[in-house]
Amino acid sequence: MATPEDVIGVVGHLPLIAESLRTAFTGQLSTTGYELCAASTLVTALAHLKMALDTPRDFRAPRLAEYRSIYEFSAIYLFLFAWLLWRVTEAFPEELAVADPLMSALFTACTAIYGVAYLLYGKGLLDRVNNDPAYDGVLRPSSESYQKQAQLYLTGNIFINGLACLFIPFAWTLTVRGTGWWDRVQALHPNQAAFMGLSLLVATLGDVSGAFLVRLKELNLVKSQSSVVVMGILSNVWLLLFPEIVFNILYTSGISEVGFYWE
């Protein structure tokens, strides 16, 4: 009974997983592979947008603690990461670099402002809705079990988006210093492009896999919230941490963690 967007939500994992493992073991960024991943990420973003349009807003929870706004956010997040996945490759057209300031501003607003700051506010708002008799906003009270689920979604999104914020300095440095700076960094550190590309891939996978688990819960294919948490932990270890660990063991001498921003 899967819809096309559900199928895309699963298939969208595959190029990202394959390319992250290839990058981790070879230490090289494949322009063709990353272009494919950028395209796959963009298609997945459209699938999540379709999910959002088909899902009614649940006003028992603040935004990013219920299904519709999670899918909306994921669509924006994946669009921006698709841009960055393409931006770090040699195939990116220099003429499009004029869009860097806008994309960096959107990236900052999506991850830091909406994805972290608003969620911290949302955690307090959820408590207020259910415990403050004077509250007169649009949100509605909910059961204790629902509140625990909503708080779990908020906490998970804060964690994922907090990690995504680590790319804000890169986006703005690339915006200000341009492609010439990025080319110079790659010349100085032979595995830097692969390191950045792999980091972008696993951050993208974190969102795609998280949205997939939320979808399983929404469709009642997984009924236990604790099962979703366990599945999330296992997928993060395999999809996110494992490639990063392999890469850093094999190629740490060919990268710069922070110093490259000033080179």
Image (cartoon, rainbow, N blue to C red):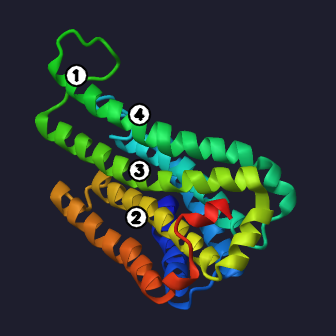
The residue closer to the viewer here, 98 or 184, is 184
Residue 42's spot in the image, x, y percent? 62, 60
Which element type, helix, strand or loop, lies under badge 2?
A: helix
Residue 37 or residue 168, whichever sits in front: 168
Q: Earlier in the sequence, mark 2 or mark 4?
A: 4
Mark 4 residue crowding within 10 angstroms, few (<14) / some (14–19) / many (20+): some
Residue 162 percent location from the top left of the image: 41, 50
Point 77% across, 48% down: residue: 99
Q: Quadrant of residue 127?
A: top left
Mark 3 residue element: helix
Q: Amino acid at mark 4?
A: Tyr
The outermost residue toward the left is: 144
Query: Where in the figure is residue 74, as x and y percent of width and height?
Result: 49, 51
Q: Which mark is residue 118?
A: 4
Q: Residues within 10 Å of mark 1 (few under 14, many from 20)?
A: some
The Cα–Cα distance between marks 4 and 3, rounded to whole angstroms, is 12 Å
- The residue to which callout 2 is attached is 209
Q: Does 128 sit left or right of 119 as displayed?
A: left
Give the residue at mark 1.
Answer: 128
Mark closest to the chain's N terminus, 4 or 3? 4
Give the distance between the C-alpha atoms of the residues marked 3 and 1, in whole angstroms: 24 Å
Q: Which residue is mark 3?
A: 162
Nearer to us of marks 2 and 1 is: 1
What residue lies at 48% left-to-right and 78% top-to-bottom? 17
